[in-house]
Structures are given as structure tokens and as C-alpha cells.
């Protein structure tokens, strides 16, 4: 953006959405109880790492987007930890509604 090559046409940074969340139907959960619990524990563990280890997040952002400047990597990593992920392992209702296409109350 600093180079002027890019222009925001929509800013979704304040939109509630699911990031690193899982949704499963009840029948799958009943049939895969141990797997469901293991996956949920892994997601919560990943969220904790993201929220407590900025360097791990920066390394992951850099790996995924190797052409980003170091400053932008830090910004993206910080944004993910602060705003995009659950802080307690639970999906927020607003984000779920957005993902389900119900953000407008439809």
C-alpha cells in the first residue's frame, strides 16, 4: 500500500468472521468423539501459541507471504493475534453468523 500500487476497495478488518474455527454436524461429532476432542484441543493450543508467541506467528506469516516487508509481517501477525482469533477457544456468535451468511439478520 505504501508504494501506491494497491488501493483498498473494501476494508474487512472490523468484520466479525471465523478464523481457525471448526463447525461440525452433530452426527459427525457423535461418530467421532475422540477425534473431535483432539482436533478441538489442537485448535485451542494453536490459538494460545498465536496469542503468546509473536515470533511464531511472524514466522508463519512470512512463510505464507514471503514477499511481505518485515514491518507488514509484524502488523499482520499482531492483527491476527489481537482481533482475528478466539481468546477462549470458542467461536463468537457474530462471527458464526457471518460465516453462515446471517450477518444481515437474514
Image (cartoon, grey):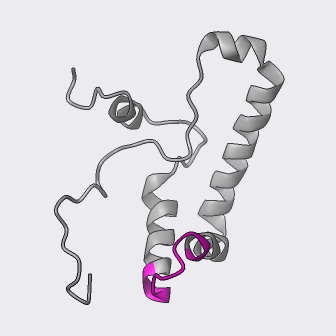
Q: Position of residue 54 (x, y in %)?
A: 61, 73
Vertical arrangement, residue 76 with respect to residue 46, above or below: below
Q: Is residue 11 left or right of residue 84?
A: left
Vertical arrangement, residue 7 with respect to residue 12, above or below: below
Magenta segment includes 66: yes
Q: Is residue 104 left or right of residue 51?
A: left
Q: How many marks?
A: 0
Quadrant location of the C terminus in the rendered image: top left
Magenta segment includes 48: no
Q: Position of residue 83 (x, y in %)?
A: 43, 57
Q: Position of residue 55 (x, y in %)?
A: 64, 77
Which residue is painted at 68% across and 45% down in the image? 44
Snapshot quadrant of residue 33:
top right
Which residue is painted at 55% across and 28% down in the image? 23
Q: Is residue 7 left or right of residue 46?
A: left
Quadrant location of the N terminus in the rendered image: bottom left
Q: Residue furthest right?
A: 34
Snapshot quadrant of residue 101:
top left
Which residue is painted at 44% across and 66% down in the image? 79
Which residue is painted at 57% across and 69% down in the image? 64
Magenta stretch: give its range. 62-72
Amino acid at each position: 500500500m505504501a508504494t501506491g500500487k494497491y488501493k483498498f476497495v473494501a476494508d474487512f478488518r472490523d468484520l466479525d468472521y471465523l478464523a481457525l474455527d471448526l463447525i461440525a454436524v452433530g452426527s459427525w461429532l457423535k461418530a467421532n468423539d475422540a477425534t473431535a476432542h483432539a482436533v478441538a484441543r489442537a485448535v485451542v493450543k494453536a490459538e494460545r501459541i498465536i496469542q503468546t508467541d509473536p515470533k511464531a506467528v511472524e514466522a508463519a506469516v512470512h512463510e505464507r507471504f514471503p514477499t511481505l516487508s518485515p514491518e507488514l509481517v509484524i502488523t499482520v501477525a499482531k492483527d491476527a493475534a489481537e482481533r482475528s482469533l478466539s481468546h477462549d477457544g470458542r467461536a463468537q456468535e457474530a462471527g458464526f453468523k457471518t460465516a453462515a451468511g446471517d450477518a444481515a439478520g437474514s
